[in-house]
Image: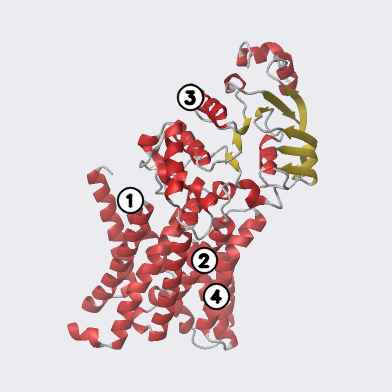
């Protein structure tokens, strides 16, 4: 069994899982505390629309997926600000627009369309070393951002209006959180897939929140739960030849259920 | 300290403030009363630069609060109407009071020993030192109000804008918060603007009551020239009915 560790593709999958766990564990805390859980769904479908448009016009679908999902994540904050509507409403509008573009594109593409669907389902075993380097870079950048602006991020989680009234540049922090969330989600689409990424964004931070009232512990537990979910997904898919994405969802959901039961027992 | 000259502000076709002028001096302790929609909250948000008037001029610390938002807001404390902490957010009482120091300290700098001393002092002054490690989302309404007050005290502000901070509190908590605000005024000699609907529960020490109606100053009273008849005209309620609500009104 251990010889599998000597294969490049499996090493990449292991590193990809750990990086996805760190990145999505942190972003998950942001989207849960900002109460914008569907940002993952909207951005992954924007990526899907991008890949379809890429196929339609003969441009690299991955490049177009990145362009579309970044455009979506950049635009949520300013559109919400300009319209005076909640970020969640804008996320819903972007999600439906992305679906519309994707289905229109699928209707116009002649020939095989499977490549467009790759981002929706993801494939952790096909990660390249370049993917790993890029993911490591953005994860590192995100940790630096968190260390530099940790106290301002805390204020934004508490209350954006109070943060602004306290002389904190809350718009910059809020928009940066949205943009970085979009970036991390987009880069992990290859690993987890657009649909499955949602569970990894929500389950680990929610399980962590149940177990602690401290923000720093919530980050830590969320990262640990996300990494455990990814690695066990990889392990079970190899041992039992089952789909890794589905296993990741089930493990992360189980972690949530165990946290819930454990809180009940401890009277937390 | 706060000088407002002939400002107007319109929302959705309705003029909320109309050719409105007001001057608030240093260490004034002002109550702002008036019917819903009279422009009370809009006025506070114009003072701290959240909103820009359509016309007229506003100067706070001799600065335009909209153009110099960050500089002005660093010296103004603001407690909002519905400022309760979500149970969803894992922040302790101390974390929230530290939010007050975050704006003071600025970007790229960690909170230091002086910040934590300010936080501890304000927790003690407000009387919630023993709650400092408790999750803030699980506190009672009155306790949460004290946390907000401690947060603004920790900022060492010069002006305190309080927007209906007694809302949703039981009478005992309302009285306790009022006494606290009076103590803070007496000790720190801040300029305080206290917006309220609770005419029977104005904190002691208030030296001006400004009544707003239809976006204009309806009356600017000191505590001894303010009576039931004025209130009756302000709220368009006959004096007998109003008396049942406010009792023998006296500041």
Residue ID at (33%, 70%): A246
Residue B227 horizontal side relative to residue A35, left or right? right
Q: Give me the residue at 71% from left, 19% from top.
A: B231
Residue A40 bears which disc, if any? none
- Kindly identify which numbered label has been placed on residue B176: 3
Give the vertical position of A63 relative to A200 (above or below). Answer: below
Task: Report, in whole angstroms, how far the alpha carbon at label 4 lies from the one at label 3.
Answer: 57 Å
Same chain, labels 1 and 3: no
Residue lying at 56% horizontally and 55% vertically, measured from the top left: A170
Residues at marks 4 and 2, CA–CA distance in whole angstroms: 10 Å
Viewer-side residue, B226 vs A224 = B226
Q: Earlier in the sequence, mark 1 or mark 2?
A: 2
Label 4: chain letter: A
Residue A107 on image: x %, y %: 57, 79
Rounded to the nearest angstrom, the CA distance separating label 1 from label 2 is 26 Å
The reply to the same-chain question for discs 1 and 4 is yes
In which quadrant of the rendered view does residue A109 lie?
bottom right
Determine whether label 4 and label 2 are within 8 Å by CB. Answer: no
Say if A55 sits above or below A72 in the image: below
Identify residue for label 1: A210
**Mark 1–mark 4 distance (CA, rounded to whole Å):** 35 Å
Front label number (1 vs 2): 1
Q: Earlier in the sequence, mark 1 or mark 4?
A: 4
Element class at badge 1: helix
Front residue of A42 and B247: B247
Q: Are marks 4 and 2 on the same chain?
A: yes
Question: Residue A240 location, x and y as percent?
Answer: 22, 76
Q: Is residue A213 left or right of residue B217?
A: left
Considering the numbered disc 3 on the image, is that residue within a helix, a strand or a loop?
Answer: helix
Residue highlighted by disc 4? A49
Q: Which residue is mark 2?
A: A42
Instruction: Quadrant for the C terminus of chain B, please.
Output: top right
């Amino acid at each position: 069994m251990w010889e599998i560790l000597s294969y490049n593709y499996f090493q990449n999958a292991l590193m990809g899982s750990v990086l996805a766990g760190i990145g999505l564990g942190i972003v998950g805390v942001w989207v849960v505390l900002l109460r914008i859980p569907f940002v993952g769904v909207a951005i992954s479908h924007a990526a899907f629309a991008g890949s379809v448009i890429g196929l339609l016009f003969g441009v690299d679908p991955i490049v177009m997926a990145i362009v579309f999902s970044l455009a979506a994540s950049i635009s949520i904050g300013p559109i919400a600000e300009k319209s005076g509507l909640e970020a969640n409403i804008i996320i819903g509008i972007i999600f439906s627009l992305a679906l519309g573009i994707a289905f229109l594109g699928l209707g116009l593409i002649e020939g095989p369309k499977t490549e467009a669907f790759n981002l929706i389902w993801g494939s952790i075993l096909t990660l390249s070393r370049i993917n790993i380097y890029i993911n490591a870079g953005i994860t590192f950048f995100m940790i630096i951002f968190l260390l530099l602006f940790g106290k301002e991020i805390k204020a934004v989680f508490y209350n954006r209006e109070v943060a602004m009234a306290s002389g904190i540049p809350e718009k910059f922090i809020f928009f940066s959180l949205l943009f970085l969330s979009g970036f991390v989600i987009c880069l992990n689409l290859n690993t987890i897939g657009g649909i499955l990424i949602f569970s990894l964004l929500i389950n680990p931070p929610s399980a962590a929140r149940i177990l602690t009232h401290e923000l720093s512990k919530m980050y830590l537990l969320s990262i640990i739960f996300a990494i455990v979910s990814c690695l066990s997904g990889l392990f079970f898919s190899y041992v039992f030849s089952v789909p890794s994405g589905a296993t990741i969802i089930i493990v992360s959901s189980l972690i949530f259920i165990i946290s819930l039961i454990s809180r009940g027992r401890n009277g937390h | 300290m706060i000088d407002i000259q002939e400002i107007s502000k319109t929302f959705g076709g309705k003029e909320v403030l109309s050719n409105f002028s007001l001057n608030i001096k240093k260490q004034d302790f002002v109550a702002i009363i008036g019917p819903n929609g009279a422009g009370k909250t809009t006025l506070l948000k114009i003072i701290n630069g959240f909103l820009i008037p359509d016309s007229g001029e506003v100067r706070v610390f001799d600065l335009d609060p909209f153009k110099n938002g960050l500089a002005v807001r660093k010296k103004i404390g603001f407690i909002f109407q519905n400022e309760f902490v979500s149970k969803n957010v894992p922040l302790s009482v101390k974390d929230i009071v530290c939010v007050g120091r975050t704006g003071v300290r600025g970007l790229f700098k960690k909170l230091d020993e002086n910040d934590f001393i300010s936080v501890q002092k304000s927790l003690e002054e407000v009387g919630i030192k023993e709650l400092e490690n408790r999750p803030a989302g699980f506190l009672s309404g009155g306790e949460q109000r004290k946390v907000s007050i401690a947060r603004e005290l920790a900022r060492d502000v010069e002006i305190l804008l309080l927007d209906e901070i007694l809302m949703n509190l039981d009478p005992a908590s309302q009285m306790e918060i009022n006494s606290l605000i009076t103590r803070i005024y007496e000790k720190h000699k801040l300029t305080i603007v206290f917006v309220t609907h609770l005419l029977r529960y104005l904190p002691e020490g208030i030296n001006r009551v400004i009544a707003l109606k239809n976006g204009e100053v309806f009356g600017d009273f000191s505590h001894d020239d303010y009576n039931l008849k004025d209130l009756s005209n302000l709220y368009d309620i006959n004096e007998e009915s109003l008396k049942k609500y406010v009792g023998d009104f006296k500041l």
